[in-house]
Amino acid sequence: MPLFRSFYMGGFECSTHRLRSGKRLDVIAATHHDTHVRADYARLQAQGIYTARSGLRWHLIEPRPYQYDFASIRPMLEAARDLNMQIIWDMLHYGYPDDLDPFTPEFVRRFAGMARAFARVYRETTDQVAFLCPVNEISFHAWGGGDVGYLNPFATERGFELKMQLARAAIEATEAVWESLPQARIVHVDPVIHIAHHPEHPEDFDDAEGHRLAQFQGWDLIAGRIAPQIGGDLKYLDILGLNYYSNNQWFHNEGGMIPLGSPYYRPFRDLAREVFIRYGRPLFIAETGAEDGLRPRWLRYMAGEARALLQEGIPLEGLCLYPILNHPGWDDERHCHNGLWDYCDDAGERELCQPYAEELQLQRALHTLSDHILPDSTQLAKAST
């Protein structure tokens, strides 16, 4: 039985972090998805997409400590219920209330409190099984906010410390959710990457491999494989989402990106297989996409990799086009043409990227045609655990 209502999904970019300039991002508001959520869900369904990723905006939900206002999320929950859309909700997508320091125990307590309150609202609003991602991209958030000072909390040389805090927050939030929603499915999303030593610098092999293996630390923390003092356990590692773009492979030590077609480039199927062998959990491609005219070509590549994984018996449950809407760039507000639809006009209509849509329908058809030749992954999943 598939986990998701549709193999192909759409992801609504929902980042809410602060930039070093002090500006708070709210991409859901910037794309007007909050005001056109029903129309946006209907647009997805017209393209054969019945599962989507979206997110909570914690800074709006908790304007004061332990006081909650769910007005920003209720209309979205109700729209998903009424239109029978299946949504994977990110509870923390980089952003948090301004009075919090993520390095403190209070951050974990407050996040668990918000998650507990949200679970109650969810239960009151809909009887759909909840799919929740407690903390989106623990690894990227820890790097951007703890190593290089790019996003909140703008720290440096504290990446692993922040990673442990985010993992601890995810664990505590999961327990809080399960109090009201014991059947909730928990999704953990992180990028999959490949880092190689440059062929002219064989001495970099160990460092490159160490950095590559660090991509698994978030999931290892949640599973209790490392730092067991934070409470990790395999029971929390339910569904794994893999984020992957064309710039997810590079040479170590500023050696540049490894392009598709290079002998040093690892096919996406290899990266996904490694994750499955390591954890034995159901997978899905939680983010993938490209900009401008590369969108159809990149989808063709990723869809082919997805079919290859399914033919091996790897339980790959879906592929999410991310983002599904064009949006302003984080740093410069440039108009990013990376979605299936553009900004909405005054009437709420969005222009469809026709070549991207045509490629999506072709890949949907190929996926359907391949169903009858795909092996049952049950035995492979059992063998890997």
Image (cartoon, rainbow, N blue to C red):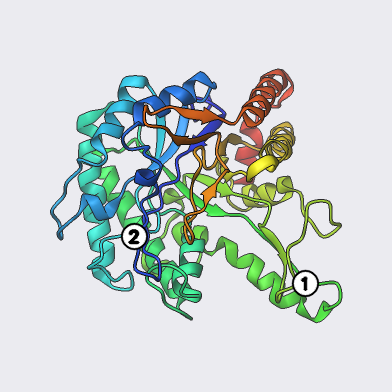
Please give left or right for residue 74 compared with residue 2 in the image. left
The residue shown at (44%, 58%) is: 222
- Which one is earlier in the sequence, the residue at label 1 or at label 2? 2
Across and down, in percent, residue 67 comes to: 13, 53
Which numbered dot is residue 8? none
Q: Is residue 222 above or below residue 375?
A: below
Task: Residue 161: name its quadrant.
Answer: bottom left
Q: Amino acid at mark 1?
A: His
Which of the two residues, 58 or 165, is positioned nearer the viewer here? Answer: 58
Q: Secondary structure at mark 1?
A: loop
Name the residue type under label 2: Arg
Closer-to-camera residue (311/56): 56
Tell us which disc is closer to us: 1 or 2.
2
The image quadrant of residue 165 is bottom left
Query: Relative to residue 13, is residue 191 depicted above or below?
Result: below
Disc on res. 197: 1
Residue 231 at least partly seen: no
Q: Is residue 242 in view?
A: yes
Check disc 2 and report its element: helix, strand or loop: loop
Query: Nearest the camera: 268 or 219?
Result: 268
Pointer 1 local density, CA inside 10 Å: few below 14, some 14–19, many at least 20: many
Quote the CA–CA distance across marks 1 and 2: 37 Å
Reply above or below: 161 against 215. below
The residue indicated by pointer 2 is: 24
**Residue 333: where, in percent of width, then height?**
47, 55
